[in-house]
Image: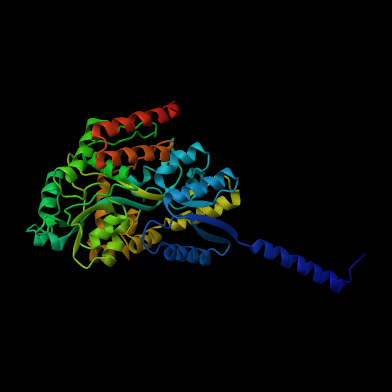
């Protein structure tokens, strides 16, 4: 049956409108994001997604908040195994080998080659790129990155007769200063500790920092070997233990990851090792003058990098991959890296971020924000291996055993080494 001209015209117009509407429907991307990393993260991330969506109406990015880094990794793995991976996720940079073993992540070199902006990759700090590459390829981009730094209470330094502008520069000075800063009441009970180094959650990270300061990187570049039982590693763990047991300048037993910043802010410890990701929190909460410094050296300065990278997943359509790359470029741009750094305390991952406003002026007014950046000169990749979560569990448990006094440092690290060797042996070619 033929349509009347008017009806035919209306039908064609309707079909055209429908096609246009279908064409205008944005590509919807999911971004898995860990929210237990500190600060008002959800508000900031929602703002980033909203701004991107306004600038790119053909794409809609929605953040899915997942808890901790570990929770985010588990949620991503569940989606991968079920054939429904996220488009993008902020996951610990150290999970790269585990994701590669699952064939889960998309290589990014093809997108970089097509990208028109020269120097896009070279502008990232090299230390942050170490956990982004494997097998000669690029697999993620640095976003929410950090190093460990030394926070110290300048008011307490002055009260103890120490120079508030000269934090300890080496292990001996750290122990000596911590002794002077440890304050006891008349009955001998400690009111203020000299130093706290967390021994839960990320104890491997603190241990690695001490090893780097003692001249040892604790794994190889291929993620197939660790060096937990080397003499330099045993010395590093012994020094950590001695701060507690011999020098008695650190709480006895386990120091909780989340407790250390609270203790520092409340004046219960004069110094702490912690992530620069806590910088904004400390700045907003501390009622005293505080400083931030490089971690004290033994043979050299040193800290592992830390934090999360943004990954694109391989099991998504080409259309989604193209859209995901645009968001990755946006999120890791110099402007957004600056914004993220100022709002959270994480290190802006690009050199150009520190050379332009507003971060340039921000650092002038708040020089503590430049310490983690400057320490990158001495930073190395965070511990990352195949079967990463298993290896972390092993070394974390044995470190806690040593710090709790149930194993000697040599025994703990020998046990961790032998168990890890057994697991990683199957990944050696």
Closer to us: 391 or 33: 391
**Visible residue check, residue 357:** no
Q: Picture coordinates of residue 102 (x, y %)?
A: 52, 38
Closer to us: 15 or 369: 369
**Is residue 87 shown left or right of residue 9?**
left
Query: Which residue of the protein is positioned furthest toward the bottom in this rendering?
Result: 6
Q: Picture coordinates of residue 202 (x, y %)?
A: 33, 47
Q: Residue at x 32, y 66 (%)?
A: 358
Q: Quadrant of the N terminus?
A: bottom right
**Is residue 322 shown left or right of residue 1?**
left
Q: Picture coordinates of residue 300 (x, y %)?
A: 19, 41
Query: Which residue of the protein is positioned furthest toward the front in this rendering?
Result: 187
Q: Residue at x 29, y 39 (%)?
A: 401
Q: Quadrant of the C terminus?
A: top left
Q: Quadrant of residue 302?
A: top left
Q: Picture coordinates of residue 170 (x, y %)?
A: 15, 45
Query: Which residue of the protein is positioned furthest toward the right in this rendering?
Result: 1
Closer to us: 99 or 50: 99
Closer to us: 13 or 364: 364
Task: Give the colour scheme shown.
Answer: rainbow
Q: Residue at x 42, y 30 (%)?
A: 423
């Amino acid at each position: 049956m033929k349509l009347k001209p008017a009806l035919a015209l209306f039908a064609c117009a309707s079909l055209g409108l429908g096609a246009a509407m279908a064409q205008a429907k944005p590509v919807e991307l999911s971004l898995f994001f860990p929210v237990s990393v500190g600060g008002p993260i959800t508000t900031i991330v929602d703002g980033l997604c909203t701004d991107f969506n306004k600038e790119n109406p053909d794409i809609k990015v929605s953040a899915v908040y997942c808890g901790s880094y570990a929770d985010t990794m588990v949620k991503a793995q569940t989606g991968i195994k079920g054939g429904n991976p996220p488009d993008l996720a902020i996951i610990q940079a150290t999970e790269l080998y585990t994701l590669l073993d699952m064939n889960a992540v998309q290589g990014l070199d093809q997108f970089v080659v097509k990208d028109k902006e020269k120097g896009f990759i070279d502008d990232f700090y090299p230390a942050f790129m170490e956990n982004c590459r494997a097998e000669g390829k690029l697999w993620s981009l640095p976003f929410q990155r950090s190093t460990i730094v030394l926070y110290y209470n300048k008011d307490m330094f002055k009260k103890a007769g120490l120079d508030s502008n000269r934090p300890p520069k080496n292990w001996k000075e750290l122990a000596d200063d911590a002794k002077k800063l440890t304050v006891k009441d008349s009955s001998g009970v400690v009111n203020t500790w000299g130093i706290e180094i967390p021994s839960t959650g990320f104890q491997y990270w603190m241990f690695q920092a001490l090893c780097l300061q003692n001249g040892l990187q604790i794994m190889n570049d291929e993620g197939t070997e660790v060096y937990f039982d080397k003499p330099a590693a045993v010395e590093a763990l012994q020094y950590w233990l001695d701060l507690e047991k011999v020098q008695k300048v650190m709480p006895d037993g386990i120091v909780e990851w989340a407790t250390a910043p609270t203790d520092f802010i409340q004046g219960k410890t004069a110094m702490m090792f912690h992530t620069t990701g806590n910088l904004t929190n400390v700045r907003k909460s501390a009622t005293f003058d505080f400083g931030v410094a490089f971690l004290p050296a033994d043979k050299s300065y040193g800290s592992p990098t830390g934090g999360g990278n943004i990954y694109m997943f391989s099991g998504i359509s080409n259309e989604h991959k193209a859209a995901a790359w645009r968001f990755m470029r946006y999120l890791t741009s110099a402007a957004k890296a600056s914004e993220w750094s100022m709002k959270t305390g994480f290190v802006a991952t690009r050199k150009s971020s520190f050379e332009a406003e507003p971060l340039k002026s921000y650092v002038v007014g708040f020089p503590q924000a430049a310490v983690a950046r400057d320490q990158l000169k001495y930073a190395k990749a965070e511990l990352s291996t195949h079967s990463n979560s298993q290896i972390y569990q092993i070394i974390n448990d044995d470190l806690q055993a040593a710090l709790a006094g149930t194993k000697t440092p040599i025994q703990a690290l020998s046990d961790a080494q032998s168990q890890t060797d057994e697991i990683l042996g199957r990944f050696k070619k």
